[in-house]
Amino acid sequence: MPGLTDVVEAVVTEDTLRAILAQRPNRQHGPKLDGDVRLKPLAYAVEELKTRLREEFVAQSCEMDAPVSEAPRAPYEGLKWPLSVALQFRDNHEDALPSRRAQVMLDTSPTLSRLTCLHCRRPVEVSAQLVRCPTQDPPAGDRHAYLSVLPDGGQFSFLQALLLGRSLTEFGCCKERLLLHSPEVPEMYLSSLAECWSLKTIRDWTRVTNWSPRGKAGKAAVRLIGLQQTQFDKVLLLELGCVAQQNLDELFELECPAGRQRNGEGTLDTTMLLLRPSVDAFRRMAEEVGSEMAVWPRRGTFPLSLEDYLLKFYNVFFGGRWSEIPSDFAGVTSPKQRIWCWLEQNSTMLLSGEDVEPPEGAAVLSSILAAPGLLDLLSTVQRDRCADCDGYDEAGIQDPVDDVWRCRWCWEAKLMEDERQEQVVQPLSVSGMEQLSKDLGPFFLHQAVRQRWTWESGWIEFRQGGVLWTKNFGIGSWHVATAHSNPSLVVYLASFDSEVRHWLRMSGDVGGEGLDECWREIFRPLGFKRQAMGQERFIKCWPCRDTAKVSGSRNRLGRCELADGPRPSAGERIPVKS
């Protein structure tokens, strides 16, 4: 509590008394005391002093009860400073040149450095110091993000995603950056992309056909998966191959949906779209895009179909109008720019370390390729690419026949082809059977040498590493889903230009030895969609009888443990004697 002496000393002063006495009370409007008796000047001064003493006492009490604010902390707390910082003007010319750099030591006091203006070429003095920037949490429901999709593990797509992310960073784009990627992207690629992107795996993706969207329309369709990211209020969908040339944050001020016209033709340019995420909108699009429904145009016009579909979709739903991204907005380089054609044509020479002169206007691409360790990274990943399908598989095997690296799928395809041609069995090793027993769980046939089941007019066989042999569909894939109380055996089979996913469970018949298909899904541009089927069309599977003959030329080269020694394990490279 404040002391009475302090309060009196603060209020009762000579100047205060003179000011109060100078305010002579009006006889008609002065304060009353004991009825209608008006106060005289001295009595008025006493009452005024009492009032001021009470107010001062309350004011000092509130100040003592108020929380004491912490002293401001030093900027960049936790770092050893002064900091050594390099200052340099950025050359925004198409053929950028390195500009003069000044190395200075920065602390909380201003530091003067001398640079040169890149336009008038005159000396410029720059003052810099460390300051603490106030941090403000974004308001709820107002999160924005740049979003792109990496649908495959190819080298070309990786470089496009890396360049897009770094260009957004270099031009100071403050919004979040999210990259959705397929499961087949190599881990080494993801480690490099994590420097400029937040990464998220697309779970509902193909496992057999290595599906990759082709053409501008296909890539735009894949990017619509970003509509599921409802943690953001707005997302700017950017096609791989775009390169930011300035800060694009101002685009988020537009109303959704927003897009650009293509060369004034009135058609939608899907290179850059500003949309509001919505799970309901995505589900409707996933059901309609590429389907036989009336809202999807006729076959053979997919590039125009998607643009026309999106334009009409948002003309009907979500407000019924598009916002226009200004046509003179030059914030993004087109994916069709010739630098990408040059990179695709010269990728082999770049990996071999040859000096290749980049085309005019590819300064930003040259800076990316010159990054330390990037060419080594590309070469390392390229070494683990399959010689047949060019797919990346770290768990693949070096084929002892022709001394090349093959992924699990192509390796197993060779084994299955040997069995068909030579009429021999390709059994698994003892350790392989133990691992397969753990992976299949309740679906493992303990009394059988091979995990083979009937499948319509043919058969399927479960192998190590999620590989599936089939009689009529080539190599497939499988995994056990345990998300539900009743586990399911999920089978992936290639079908023409798409992929079909079958969900199987143990038969409910007496004995429970068979597998019953519960439902079936087909892959479309935006993920798997369940097919409507009658019960009579579902597949019923039964265990097959084993065959016993074990031989074959490839077995003698180390592919079968029961023949001539152990077979190479996944990820193993073995020397081949000439």
Image (cartoon, rainbow, N blue to C red):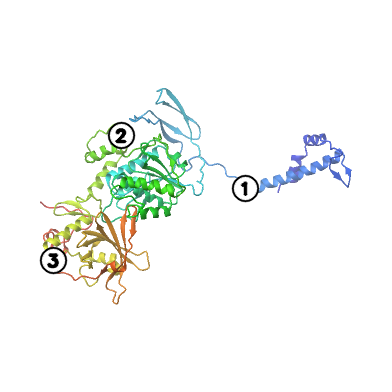
Residue 575 is situated, as x and y percent measured from the top left of the image, at 16, 52
Residue 67 image label: 1
> Between disc 2 and disc 3, whose residue precedes?
2
Whether residue 260 appears in this view of the structure is yes
| Residue named by callout 3 | 550
Circle 1 crowding by C-alpha within 10 Å: few under 14, some 14–19, many from 20: few
Residue 542 is situated, as x and y percent measured from the top left of the image, at 24, 71
Circle 2 crowding by C-alpha within 10 Å: few under 14, some 14–19, many from 20: some
Q: Label 2 sits on what residue type?
A: Ala
| Residue named by callout 2 | 362
Q: CA distance from mark 1 to mark 3?
A: 84 Å
Q: CA distance from mark 2 to mark 3?
A: 58 Å
Q: Which residue is at 48% across, 42% downward?
A: 77
Q: CA distance from mark 1 to mark 2?
A: 58 Å
Q: Is residue 41 left or right of residue 124?
A: right
Camera-near label (1 vs 3) is 3
Whether residue 431 appears in this view of the structure is no
Residue 506 is situated, as x and y percent measured from the top left of the image, at 30, 70
Q: Which residue is at 27% across, 41% downward?
A: 375
